[in-house]
Image (cartoon, helix red, strand yellow):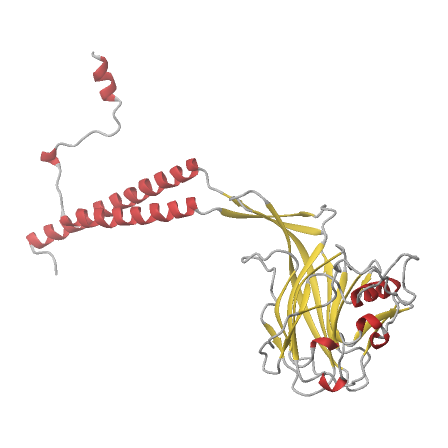
Amino acid sequence: MKFADVLRRLDAYPRTLDDFSVRTVGGAAVTIISTSIISLLVFLEFLNYMKPMLSEELFVDTTRGHKLRINLDVTLHNLACNYISLDAMDSSGDTHLRVDHDVFKHRLDLEGQPLKETPIKEIVAVSPPNKNSTCGSCYGAEHNATHCCNTCEDVLDAYRVRKWNMQVDKIEQCKGKYKRTDEDAFKEGCRIQGHLEVNRMAGSFHFAPGKSFSIRQFHIHDFQFTNVKLSHTINHLSFGEKIEFAKTHPLDGLRVEVQESKSEMFNYYLKIVPTLYERHSDGQPIYTNQFSVTRHRKDLTDRERGMPGIFFSYELSPLMVKYAERHVSFGHFATNCCSIVGGVFTVAGILAVLLNNSWEALQRKLEVGKLS
C-alpha cells in the first residue's frame, strides 16, 4: 500500500462526483443568503477588532500630591461683575478669598450679550515688576520693612494674607480702579470663566454678592441690598479633564431662573469620584474626576438663616474608577471569524437539506395525487 493511499484514507472531506450531485434553486438561495450573512458578521467583527474595548476597574484611591482642579464657567444674569466674589475653602481651614487663579469676569448686558471690553481678572496673581524706585505703602499689612505695595493688587494680596478688611476707596493705589455705585448692581450680568486649583480634600466654593473678607474665622460679605436675584446658568463645571463617555460634567447647560426679585440660597452638594483614564493610543494616564450632584434652594425672604449666593460643596470618594482601553488580539479576531463561517455554513446546510427533503416529499404526493 502506497503512502498516498494511506493519507487518502484520512481525508475527512471526500469529494462527491458531479454526476451524483444535484443543484437546486433552493440551495442557491440558501447559499446566497448565508454568504451575505457571513460577510456582514465578519465586517462587524472587523470593526469591533479595530475599535478598542473599554474595561472598568474599581479600587482604593492611593494617589497623593495631586491638586484638585476646578474648571468653571458660570453666568449670573442679573448681577454686575464688580459685585460678585468667588471664594473657596477646604476642610483644613484654608480660605482663599477672591481667588487669584486664572478666573476672568466678562461683563454682560441683561440680554446676555457681552459688552465690548477687556475681561476683568478676579485678582492678578503675579504683578509686573515696578520700574519706579519708590516703595508704595501696604497700609500696615507689609510683611517686613522692605515689603512694597506699588499696585492695588499688591495691597489686596497683603490684606488677604493677613485676613483684614480693606476699604478700597481709601487706598491710593486703588483710586479710580474699583469705582462702583450700588445702583448699578442689577443693571448688568456677569460671566465667570476659568479654573482654580485647591487642596485635594473636601471643601466648597461659592459665588456671592459683595466684597468678601474674614474676621476671627468668620466669613463675611459686604453687601447692602436685602433682595438679590441670582438667576444663573452653569455653562460648564468639571474637576479635571473632560471625558465624553463619563459623568465628568453632569451640570453643563443647567439654567436656574428666579421669577421674583427675592434673595435665595442655592446649594449644590457634589460627590466626587476620582477617575483614571488610560488611552491605548498614547498610553498616558489621565487623572480626572466624575461627580454626582444634589441640588437645594432656600428662600431667604421669610427670615431664614443663610446668605444669598450660589454654593458648591464637594466631598471626595476614597475609591477610584479606572477606565482602560484594550485592543482585541488578532487570535481572538481570527477565532471569531472561523466561528462565524463554520456556524453559518452548518446552519445553512441543515436548512438546505430540510428544504430539499420537504420539496421532494411534496412533489411525490403531487405525483400520486394524495395532496388534498
Q: Nearer the viewer, residue 204 or 169?
A: 169
Residue beneath the point at 58% across and 78% down:
113
Tell me where residue 257 sits by quadrant.
bottom right
Q: In which quarter of the image is the N terminus?
A: top left
Q: Where is residue 7 in the image (x, y as percent from the top left)?
A: 25, 19
Q: Nearer the viewer, residue 242 or 353?
A: 242
Tell me where residue 97 sits by quadrant.
bottom right
Q: Where is residue 261 in the image (x, y as percent from the top left)?
A: 70, 87
Residue beneath the point at 52% across and 48% down:
54
Lateral position of residue 88 relative to residue 105, left or right:
right
Q: Specify the farthest residue to the top.
A: 1
Q: Position of residue 202 (x, y in %)?
A: 77, 59
Would you place residue 94 above or below residue 169 in this image?
A: above
Would you place residue 72 above or below residue 45 in this image?
A: below
Lateral position of residue 16 relative to residue 193, left or right:
left
Residue beneath the point at 69% across and 51% down:
319
Q: Which of 365 and 130 is in front in this view?
A: 130
Q: Quadrant of the C terminus?
A: bottom left
Would you place residue 218 above or below residue 323 in this image?
A: below
Residue beneath the point at 84% across and 70% down:
213
Q: Specify the farthest residue to the front.
A: 133
Give the number of callouts: 0
Q: Where is residue 243 in the image (x, y as percent from the top left)?
A: 57, 56
